[in-house]
Amino acid sequence: MRVTVAGQMESTLPAADDHPYRTGPWRPNHTEYDAEDLDVVGTIPADLDGVYLRNTENPVHDSIGNYHPFDGDGMLHMIRFQDGRASYRNRFVRTVGLEAENAAGGPLWAGLAEPPARSRREDGWGARSRMKDASSTDVVVHAGLAKTSFYQCGDLYRLDPRTLENLGRETWGGRFPAEGVSAHTKVDEHTGELLFFNYSTEAPYMHYGVVDAEDRLVHYVDVPLPGPRLPHDMAFTERFAILNECPLFWDQELIAKGIYAVRYHPELPTRFAVIPRRGGSGDVRWFEAAPTYVLHWINAYEEGDEIVLDGFFQHNPQPSLRGANTFYERISRFLSLDQMQSRAHRWRFNLATGATREEDLSDRIMEFGMINGRHGGRPYRYAYNMTAPPGRFLFDGIVKHDLQTGGEVHYAFADGIFASETPMAPRRGSTSEDDGYLLSFITDMNADRSECWIFAAQDLNAGPIARVALPARISSGTHACWAPADALRA
Ligand SMILES: [Fe+2]
């Protein structure tokens, strides 16, 4: 492996940090590397051709008050596979907020766990305002470029997916929405479109939009809600976009006082907006379902009169405190899949009758589902989900979930080894849905190193067919994606 240091970020984090999401497997990286000819145990398949991108939270500066793991500055990790070889780079997303904090030599904005009034700057981003847009939540490749995003709504930052060169903010020719864009933009691999939404505390509280394959904003409409809501993800089928409002949201009366307290309302339904992909506000069909909160959808598709939507139903969206009333215990409730009891779930919305049917698809606690992207919005059979150790936001296993038979194949990582969200990379020339590879960046606390593990999607149980060394142990993080070579801008 040939490694060069491409950059080093000056950090103001405390030297003896004890924050559980800034130490151990969440220890942030501040060095940027270029690495060629990565060392491999096993064989990198010659028909694996594209890039695997992961966004991670890497706080550069100390927090104002308490640090929440979603506040960390975005850093992309990229591994490029071509002709049986691999190269790697990591880069900070040069957000406007990070550049301002670097210039100030310290934090300027308070994070999720603190009231916006504690921010030192009056301006900022996010549905609740006066936050830093860290662009650290999600990443997709659209119109040839990587686009990072932030769950509280903000800009999309563009990076070259081959080099990770920062290319600045997305503008969509001056039409980028003033309300920002939420994480979990969706790319339809068949049309090349990017579908997105945003949410805010101002009426109409949600918008939905479409950007075409040439990166032009071609559709942007209001999706009025009864009040401020906290949607995190969206879904789509060939003809429809599916937005949601779950009954877990900020108390509207407290917002006026600058307090953003999340409350669950089990007396209210979960509501789904089904809108034709280029439809107007008046075309929205609303469906009601059992109350819950859903972080992530797996996929959706059309079947006869029905829209089938799969995602992770939280059986306990507002877990009560288990331990002492400390900051860590309070935030960890909402970071622990075992406490929220997230299970794969299927909703069916009947467009003819307006009725909803729903059921759990598994008893297992899991989340962060990935699919073969070619089946996005279309019928599919397999999801690749992550399991988590109790009480921690870390991934300790991968489950290949056969939605046709209900069968599950579970690969458990050894103690101290943590994985990434694990996208499916179809083999070049693949002939069936699971004909390809699963990719996961590994943070190995036992050996103090990171690797990218490659699994055959048809034989997850066999373990990795290749383990590719990275130059340094990387921090855990949130979302990841696979982009085949033909989706990257030449
Ligand atoms: Fe997410």
Image: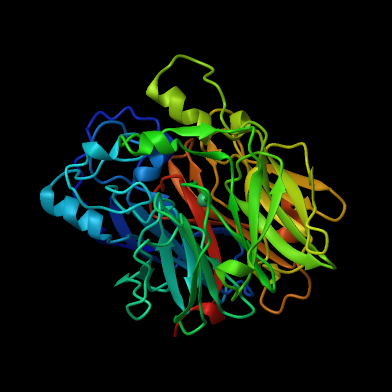
Residue at 78% x, 63% y is 351
Indicate the position of residue 297 as horizontal and vertical percent values: 63, 53
Query: Does residue 338 appear anywhere in the picture?
Result: yes
* Quarter of image, res 328: top left
Compared across the picture, whether 57 is left or right of 224 comes to left
As drawn, 381 above or below 406: below
Residue at 40% x, 35% y is 253
As drawn, 244 above or below 362: below
Query: Does residue 461 appear anywhere in the picture?
Result: no
Q: Quadrant of the N terminus?
A: bottom left
* Quarter of image, res 476: top left
Residue placed furthest toward the left = 104
Q: Quadrant of the C terminus?
A: bottom left
**113 or 456: nearer the viewer:** 113
Indicate the position of residue 54 as horizontal and vertical percent values: 47, 57
Residue placed furthest toward the right = 405
Residue at 42% x, 33% y is 261
Compared across the picture, whether 102 is left or right of 451 comes to left
Residue placed furthest toward the top = 324
Compared across the picture, whether 392 is left or right of 109 comes to right
**256 or 139: nearer the viewer:** 256
Indicate the position of residue 310 as horizontal and vertical percent values: 71, 53
Indicate the position of residue 414 as horizontal and vertical percent values: 61, 37
- Counting the numbered discs, the total is 0
**153 or 412: nearer the viewer:** 153
As drawn, 62 above or below 431: above
